[in-house]
Amino acid sequence: MAISEETFYLDPSHEGTLQKQIQTMVAEGILSGRFRSGERLPSSRKLAQHLGISRITVTLAYSELLADDYVVSKGRSGYFVSETAPRPRMAQSSMPREDAVDWARMIGTRWSTGPKLEKPGDWRRFKYPFIYGQADASLFDHRNWRLCALQALGQRDFAAMTADYYERDDPKLVEFIARHSLPRRGIQARPDEILVTLGAQNALWLAAQILLTQRRTAVIEAPCYPGLRDILNQTRCSVLPVEVDAKGLPPKAITGEADVVFATPSHHCPTSVTMPLDRRRELLERASTDNFLIVEDDYEFEMSFLEPPSPALKSLDREGRVIHIGSFSKSLFPGLRLGYLVGSEPFIREARALRSTILRHPPGHVQRTAAYFLSFGHYDALIKRTANAFRERRRVMEDAIRVNGLEVAGGGGGGSSLWMRASEQTDSEILARRLAEQGVLIESGTSFFPGDDPPKNFYRLAYSSIPVERIPEGIELIAQALRKYR
């Protein structure tokens, strides 16, 4: 790695010659740990040119550093930080500081309160990761994604990678969504009715900001996606939770004061139950009668591997009341952070304007890479491969759950997880901590419930990232831990 000449500057107040000042800068960089063994220093010509001094001054400074074993010379390759240079000094303790700011008063809006989903960054070190929303490297098509990324870096796509789209999106990606992704859900939409987002979370935030105020009421499912609950709390609207049943959100339970209803009909989060077609039509009829909008999070629709996917709510909508949210983050990989909003042109126009005030648009190179991966057919092949793997893992997990006498509270027609119920005396947060000590990762269900007194005996088991051969033993360990509560 090369050390840039831009990291050097001359201090007019420095006492001593220019040569000594350069020596000091290099030595301090090494002793502070900023410059590391083996890193190449700027050439004497480049550094002299950058500092506006004589090249011989830099050469003499390097010679002194060479004599003190701070640097080594490697022929025509230049000067490098020596492997045997003095070791960096221990970081000095900072001066005591008393923060004089009253942050409790100065912070106008709080974002860190409330229960949060815990997602351990080191989940791969656990032998039994029943953790949701992580990519399985054994299933992903690394080779073709790399090739698509390289193609998107090419000269022909230079403008797509580097241009500021301002409020627009990559036309190739929007075209794929309009001509391929949405028709699979029965939806027809024009480009001006589609907005690319940084995943479904960003899409939900945009929708909430545009549609809700302190005087409006939002209906959410209970349990629900914690990220949505946090978004709605920040809008300061009235939030009415409606408890889901075996068919998802019951339209009859929605009160007449609702302005916006947030629903996950494909696979409810977190139970994974699927809303049947007759209930979808009933929900749309209620929306028309009571004059409310529906935000449809088309959660994991690609993973409907146990039964054919039902038509999206948006495909049944004849009055423009449904705003549809899709995402590639689950079907490709979470770190991609690409999703989309589909709605009537006036809504998308406002969403586009709001997005531009925050991030303009998702990175052009990411959009173009995804567009190539999708349009070349790699995406559909990946979905098929993933669905086959998930079907087998689901079968093995259900068998292990049945053998060990565990209770499934929700599963639906696919998805990537099962919603589980334990005895009422079970605290799933404590259970999760105990199991982690045995190499088993599960998700406590507490954070999915709105309100101050959520039930503690629910938990979620995902099969998206765990090898199939480890599932039975992992389930047995969970059953052993649960027996201690009986």
Image (spheres, grey):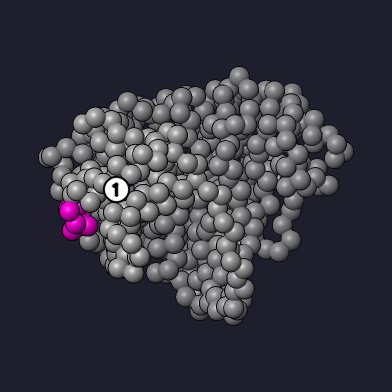
User: So how many labels did they put on this image?
Assistant: 1
Kindly give the residue lying farthest to the top in the view shown.
469
Is 65 displayed left or right of 87 in the figure? Answer: left
Does the magenta stretch mainly form a helix, a strand or a loop? helix
State left or right for residue 121 relative to residue 25. right
Residue 320 in picture, x, y percent from top left: 34, 61
Q: Which of 413 and 359 is in front in this view?
A: 359
According to the image, label 1 marks what residue? 61
Which range of residues does the magenta coloring cover?
46-54
- Residue 157's x, y, as percent? 16, 42
Element carrying mark 1: helix
**Identity of the amino acid at label 1?**
Ala
- Does residue 118 lie above or below 304 as drawn? below
Q: In which quarter of the image is residue 229?
A: bottom right
Q: Which residue is drawn at 55% across and 42% down?
A: 121
Find residue 304 and report its horizontal and vertical position in percent. 47, 35
Residue 74: % across, % down: 28, 30
Task: Pick whichever, 28 or 59, lies toward us.
Answer: 59
Instruction: Classify the position of the N terminus by image quarter.
Output: top left
**Residue 50, magenta (yes or no):** yes
Quarter of the picture containing the C terminus is top right
Q: Residue at x 58, y 66 (%)?
A: 95
Quarter-of-image position of residue 153: top left
